[in-house]
């Protein structure tokens, strides 16, 4: 049983215990009020008797309350003390459960913090490896063929953001070590094509950014290199 399940079970038990204690408190309070009412009536009667004795010719008038009145007052004090004890017990029970919950929350927050740190360290390590792999791809264009697909990780990230290979804006966090390509200056994603100009500064382009849907036949040049090539032919 997990802590949450055990704590929930204890809360159910706590509710029953508190209900019984509060019911007993109400009974004690009712008994205390009745005892105080009777004691007040008895004391008022005895005070009246004392006044009459003083006003009469009684040589030794009674100036003290009766034993019954004193016993009733002592009984009221005992009931009040019992009410205080019950209230303290209820408070201690609730406080104990609050402390248990605080400890569980502190432990859970610590575990979540560690998981986030481990996940961040793992992501950073994976990003570093992806960056090195990307640099290798950039330097080995001739060995990769004219077209290629982005890595599964980047393609998955692209799909999760709702972007397609035909979109030019890819709102993805770019790792400093991950190389960027194309006219959009974004990381590799989707299907890409290499410019046949060996001196092309960009080299790789996303199909959607250069208006391609299928792999072209023959040699293909990016818009900048195509413009330069045409201008050279016109001279």
Image (tube, grey):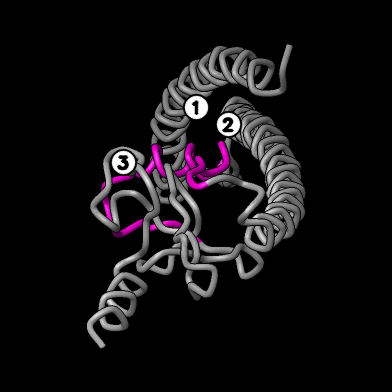
Q: Say which residue appears at 32% left-offset and 80% top-offset.
A: 228
Report how far apart the C-alphas of labels 1 and 2 lie in the structure. 6 Å
Q: Which mark is residue 32?
A: 1
Q: For residue 168, which quarter of the picture?
A: bottom left
Tell which circle, 1 or 3, labels the residue nearer the N-terminal end: 1
Q: Which mark is residue 76?
A: 2
Q: Quadrant of the N terminus?
A: top right
- Tell whether label 3 touches label 1 (CB within 8 Å): no
Q: Is residue 26 left or right of residue 167?
A: right
Q: Say which residue appears at 75% left-offset and 42% top-offset.
A: 111
Report how far apart the C-alphas of labels 1 and 3 lie in the structure. 72 Å
Image position of 60 with respect to 138: above or below: above
10 in the magenta segment: no
Image position of 114 with respect to 182: above or below: above
- Residue stretch rendered in magenta on the structure: 146-173
Residue identified by numbered label 3 = 162
- Tell whether label 2 touches label 3 (CB within 8 Å): no
Residue 66 appears in the picture as rendered: no
């Amino acid at each position: 049983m997990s802590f949450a399940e055990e704590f929930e079970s204890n809360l159910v038990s706590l509710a029953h215990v508190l209900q019984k204690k509060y019911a007993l408190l109400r009974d004690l309070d009712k008994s205390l009020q009745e005892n105080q009412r009777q004691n007040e009536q008895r004391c008022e009667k005895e005070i009246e008797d004392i006044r009459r004795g003083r006003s009469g010719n009684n040589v030794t008038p009674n100036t003290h309350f009766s034993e019954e009145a004193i016993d009733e007052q002592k009984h009221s004090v005992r009931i009040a003390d019992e009410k205080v004890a019950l209230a303290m017990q209820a408070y201690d029970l609730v406080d104990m459960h609050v402390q248990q919950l605080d400890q569980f929350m502190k432990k859970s927050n610590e575990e979540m913090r560690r998981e986030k740190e481990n996940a961040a360290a793992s992501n950073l390590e994976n990003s570093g490896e992806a960056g090195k792999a990307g640099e290798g791809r950039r330097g080995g264009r001739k060995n990769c063929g004219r077209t290629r697909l982005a890595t599964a990780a980047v393609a998955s990230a692209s799909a999760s953001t709702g972007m397609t290979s035909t979109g030019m804006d890819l709102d993805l966090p770019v790792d400093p070590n991950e190389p960027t390509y194309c006219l959009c200056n974004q990381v590799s994603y989707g299907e890409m094509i290499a410019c046949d100009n060996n001196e092309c500064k960009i080299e790789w382009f996303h199909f959607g950014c250069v208006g391609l849907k299928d792999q072209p036949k023959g040699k293909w040049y990016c818009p900048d290199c195509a413009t330069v090539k045409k201008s050279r032919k016109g001279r």
